[in-house]
């Protein structure tokens, strides 16, 4: 039976699953865009009133980290701005609007032409995180709260400074909520059919997160410093019959996938391969 190009492109061949504990080293905040119960600027809460660490924030931070590291690995990142980077990618809305006719023409010519156009106009970062014409390979779940100590949401004061006199402006004091650093979250990331360069890019980002990075708002004021602990990695190769059967019949991640004992060694190997390919 002939396999269509679309089916061959999106056939399940491999999956990675990474879990870790995200530990904050300082207070942090993901703003709600509204006033808090006792402050001018509230933090985002779930329906139970607990501080929420949304998957969209985690994925956005991870994308930003990958964008900053892509060039070091010889990979392309459009930064969602083709004019600034010179990398043609459909994720730039204004660029895609100008080239929409080219995309429609490729679609009319058939599946192979359409897929070729998508490959040629999707940067490496957008291949992993998704674009208007390319489904994301990577998914981030909301952070899962480990524990919530009492008094975890605190209120801090802020003032508006006069940039000329470097003094506080009268009448422009405000306050904002932040979450204490003793609140920790379980982090989980899944990647479908990762290419070798996808794994190299993700690995480089995870190394940086393990060393320490910043997340959320007011990071220039010292908020949001975090690092990863207890990183674990699992994988499944759907081309191997036993692994495919285990994945289909298992109930949890640990029952369905194969543990990768040393995540650092795994991703270091992918990074070394990507750097070696540049020399060739």
Image (tube, rainbow, N blue to C red):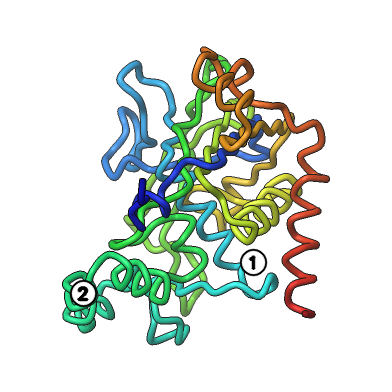
Measuring 73% from the left and 33% from the top, which residue is drawn there?
229
Quadrant location of the C terminus? bottom right
In this picture, is 26 found above or below 137? above
Front residue (pair 248, 252): 248
Q: Quadrant of residue 55?
A: top left
Residue 86: % across, % down: 45, 87
Measuring 28% from the left and 80% from the top, which residue is drawn there?
95
User: Disc 2 on helix, strand or loop?
Assistant: helix
Q: Earlier in the sequence, mark 1 or mark 2?
A: 1
Give the CA distance from mark 1 to mark 2. 36 Å
Answer few, some or many: residues within 10 Å of disc 2's Cα (few below 14, many 20 plus, some between 14 and 19): few
Residue 160: % across, % down: 41, 61
Q: Quadrant of residue 14?
A: top right
Measuring 36% from the left and 51% from the top, which residue is drawn there?
2
Circle 1 sits on which residue? 69
Front residue (pair 37, 143): 143
Circle 2 sits on which residue? 109
Residue 238: % across, % down: 56, 35
User: Disc 1 on helix, strand or loop?
Assistant: helix
Quadrant location of the N terminus? top left
Q: How many marks?
A: 2
Measuring 45% from the left and 52% from the top, which residue is drawn there?
60
């Amino acid at each position: 039976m002939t396999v269509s190009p679309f089916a061959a492109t999106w056939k399940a061949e491999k999956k990675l699953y990474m879990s870790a504990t995200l530990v904050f080293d300082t207070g942090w905040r993901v703003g709600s865009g509204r006033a808090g119960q006792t402050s001018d600027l509230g933090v985002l809460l779930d329906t139970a009133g607990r501080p929420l660490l949304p998957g969209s924030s985690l994925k956005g931070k991870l994308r930003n980290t990958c964008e900053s590291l892509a060039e070091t690995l010889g990979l392309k990142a459009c930064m969602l701005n083709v004019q600034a980077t010179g990398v043609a990618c459909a994720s730039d809305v204004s660029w895609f609007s100008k080239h929409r006719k080219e995309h429609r023409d490729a679609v009319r010519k058939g599946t192979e032409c359409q897929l070729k156009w998508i490959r040629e106009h999707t940067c490496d970062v957008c291949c992993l995180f998704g674009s208007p014409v390319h489904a994301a390979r990577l998914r981030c779940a909301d952070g899962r709260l480990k524990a919530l100590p009492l008094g975890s949401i605190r209120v801090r004061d802020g003032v508006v400074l006069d940039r000329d006199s470097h003094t506080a402006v009268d009448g422009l004091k405000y306050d904002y909520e932040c979450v204490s650093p003793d609140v920790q979250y379980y982090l989980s990331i899944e990647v479908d059919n990762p290419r070798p360069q996808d794994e190299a890019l993700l690995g480089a980002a995870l190394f940086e997160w393990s060393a320490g990075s910043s997340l959320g708002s007011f990071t220039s004021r010292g908020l949001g410093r975090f690092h990863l602990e207890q990183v674990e990695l699992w994988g499944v190769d759907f081309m191997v019959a036993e692994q495919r059967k285990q994945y289909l019949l298992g109930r949890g991640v640990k029952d369905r996938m194969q543990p990768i004992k040393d995540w650092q060694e795994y991703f270091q190997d992918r990074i070394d391969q990507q750097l070696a390919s540049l020399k060739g």
